[in-house]
């Protein structure tokens, strides 16, 4: 705790002392820390309630590691349905993939869409093919499916799509 807050050569210093996080004067003495916090309970770790606050008796607690990991400054939170939970907590609660929820959040979707089990289910079979067919590329004044253009160039659909997008050639066919 003290090293990461005060020793500039400590690898964790930029995330603690470098952000202005310190240790209260009372805890300069380990005996005072021990009197305030007690012995570390088995399976617990020291956690700051306010990640931007100092290590002090009113801002520290013993918590299980799983809870501390979710109480970090870079934890992505989603507020919905009257609750503010981390993506990991929502994923566990709803039985959805953490990565799916994170990608939805990064795309800027509203909270209810991020947490919806039905949202953006990947189409399969004919539904997937028709969605791919709806994206077209404009080549020499003619419209063609991206897959046709990919075949002509001898590249994958994804490569052709990215090239067409970067060159401003994509056209959406009417549904």
Image: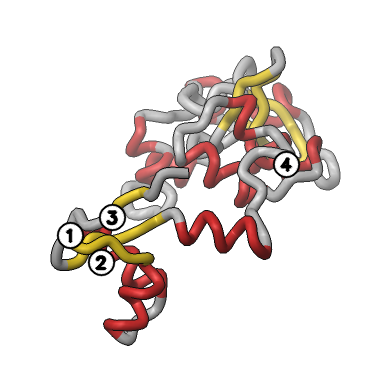
Q: CA distance from mark 4 to mark 1?
A: 38 Å
> The residue tagged with tag 4: helix, strand or loop?
helix
Which of labels 3 and 4 is toward the front?
A: 3
- Say which residue appears at 65% left-offset and 38% top-offset: 119
Q: Residues within 10 Å of mark 2 (few under 14, many from 20)?
A: some
Q: CA distance from mark 3 to mark 4?
A: 35 Å
- Left or right: where does residue 87 sit relative to residue 92? left
Q: Are marks 2 and 1 in contact (CB under 8 Å)?
A: yes
Which of labels 1 and 3 is toward the front?
A: 3
Q: Which residue is mark 2?
A: 163
| Residue 81 visible in the current orientation | yes
Tell me which numbered mark, 2 or 3, is placed earlier along the sequence.
2
| Residue 31 visible in the current orientation | no
Asked if residue 46 is positioned above or below residue 171 in the image, the reply reads above
Q: Quadrant of the N terminus?
A: top right
Q: Position of residue 70 (x, y in %)?
A: 64, 38
Tell me which numbered mark, 3 or 4, is placed earlier along the sequence.
4
> The residue tagged with tag 2: helix, strand or loop?
helix
Q: Which residue is mark 1?
A: 167
- Which of the numbered marks, if any, corresponds to residue 91? 4
Q: Which residue is mark 3?
A: 170
């Amino acid at each position: 705790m003290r090293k990461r807050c005060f020793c500039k050569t400590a690898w964790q210093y930029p995330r603690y002392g470098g952000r202005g996080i310190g240790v209260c004067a009372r805890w300069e003495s380990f005996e005072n820390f021990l009197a305030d916090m007690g012995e570390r309970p088995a399976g617990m770790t020291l956690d700051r309630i306010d990640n931007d606050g100092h290590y002090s008796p009113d801002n520290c607690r013993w918590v299980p590691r799983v809870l501390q990991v979710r109480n970090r400054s870079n934890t992505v939170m989603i507020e919905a349905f009257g609750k503010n939970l981390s993506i990991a907590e929502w994923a566990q609660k709803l039985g959805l993939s953490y990565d799916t929820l994170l990608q939805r959040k990064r795309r800027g979707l509203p909270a209810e869409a991020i947490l919806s089990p039905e949202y953006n289910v990947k189409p399969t079979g004919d539904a997937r093919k028709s969605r791919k067919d709806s994206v077209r590329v404009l080549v020499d004044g003619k419209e063609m499916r991206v897959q046709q253009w990919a075949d002509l160039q001898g590249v994958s659909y994804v490569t052709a799509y990215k090239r067409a997008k970067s060159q401003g050639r994509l056209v959406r066919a009417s549904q």
